[in-house]
Image (cartoon, rainbow, N blue to C red):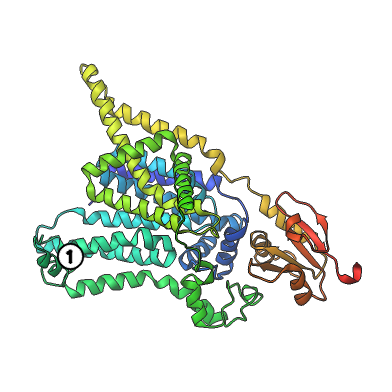
Amino acid sequence: MKVPHAPRLITLALFVGFLALYAATAAPSVLSGDSAEFQLAATLLGVAHPTTYPLYTMLAHLTTRLLPFGELAWRVTLLSSLCAALAVALFFLLARRVLGATGPATATALALGLAPGLWNAATLAEVYALLALLMVALGLALSHDRRPTTDEHTASTDGRRLRLPAFIGGLGFSHHGLFAITALPLLAAAVLWAKTKDERPSSPVRRLWSFVPGPSSPVRRPWSLVILALCFIAGLTPWLYPLAQFAAHGPFDGQDYGLPRHYFWGAPRSYGEVLDLMTGGTVRRGIFRTPEPTAALETLRMVGRRLLFEFGPLGTLLGLLGSWALARRERAAFAAAAWVFFSTLGYLLLLGPAVGDAPVFTLPMLLPWALWIGAGVGVVGGWVGGQLHMHLSRHRWFNVQRIAFSVLIALTLAWGGTRYRVSAKQHLWLYREFAQSTLEALPPGAAVIAHWEQGMALQYVRLVEGVRPDVWVDVVEPTDDPWGPRAARRYPERPVYLVGHAGSVAGLPAEPVREGEYASLFRLRRHSEE
């Protein structure tokens, strides 16, 4: 189905406009924690923490190669800007197919693009903008299959249309666990629907029999199912990346992230350990738990506050109105959107207290809510336009409905303007200044022990930019041994420095060297000095 000329121009304008916005407000340099690790791993073609995120790492490395300007860290971040801008543009096309009108679809895309959740994901070196893009791409690809089948040729064509969604499904499954929970069931539902839509069995026996491969439906032919499976498997090829990196640089000794040989989180010693990392490893095991009533209630409150933060009171009300309207008019689209929303909510309810950044995982919920906002805009715009048209019908040149839509879109843009201060990061030089000043303050041959958040920024500056190669950065995890015994055991001949806050060095013979806004530097005194 070809896209008309005007929507194509709007799609292009949305992509270019949001890419410019996201790139201009993106973090300009190295970040901290996971983001710094992604900048490090992507630049050096290393392997990040579980689930290793190979698709993101390879695309980010490609971005650093193709862009001939800017810091390498910023180039990695720019991949998020590209993915988020493309997600907004494709979401407009998806919303236009579902809502059937350009005005509400434009409001939908603007609401999504200006929501701080996606805006933040677009300005950091993180995996969530790519997750949003894969989810939107899958929804758009599946939306081709909504027309009824009329003959065998059309059925065969509809069956072929599932091949692209199957490939996208494999890519998303290899990228992030949230995709498997929220989006992959939609692909499975589309395949099952294609299996049964040619005949509508009335009895339970015939309904059960309809799921047995037969000749009448495009994906009830065995070869069609095999082709779809192969397309899905082709989407899983990014998983070959960590295996290839282990073949090239492993086995490791299980310490120091594979350094100095190569950056490989967990430093696996066997292919079995690599596969364990790819499926979550110890980092992902144990993060879920059965929610207690008080914890569940707090999660629900967090989601409510998050929706108000993302879309404001008007957007929240429009989303409620639009969900009701879509449920009445487009039940399949409403069911898909509701699944994404409530499956994400279920994921949040099951997260344990060990996950400190739970609000980040609300990003998939923005997609259905933005769609519902567009449906709500359609309802309000149509009603206002109809009411005013009765009073202004004499002025045929006066397109009341279009003006009503324009006002609602303008309100969306105005709300987005208020989100600038919480989303823009173009002035975020804090972590680079911390890393550079910390490394400059260290004596030759020093070892510095730091937590993950600060340590990865130090690792990036040291390994990617070659600053202070004589210094060894020891990034510790919460399960590692205490800093004092660790320093005595691992660095008996080196001067040892600690990075953190006063609470991080409590009980240790440490004296402050440099205090900083983000973290301070301490020198660990030896027993001979006391």
Foreground of the two, 112 or 313: 313
Residue 433 vertical placement versus 383 (above, below): below
Would residue 60 appear left or right of 70 to someone viewing this image?
left
- Indicate left or right for 226 with 310 as reference: left
Mark 1 falls on what kind of element?
Answer: helix
Pinpoint residue 286: horizontal percent, then vertical percent.
Answer: 50, 67
Q: Residue at x 55, y 48 (%)?
A: 26
The number of callouts visible is 1
Quadrant housing residue 513: bottom right
The residue positioned 25% from the left and 61% from the top of the image is 189
Residue extending furthest toward the front: 293
| Residue 180 rendering spot, x and y as whole percentages | 38, 63
**In this orientation, does residue 23 appear?**
yes
Q: Is residue 45 left or right of residue 497?
A: left
In the rendered structure, the answer to whether residue 457 lies left or right of residue 369 reads: right
Tag 1: amino acid: Lys
The residue depicted at 73 percent of the width and 59 percent of the height is 504
Q: Label 1 belongs to which residue? A: 195
Q: At x 29% / y 39%, what residue is drawn?
A: 102
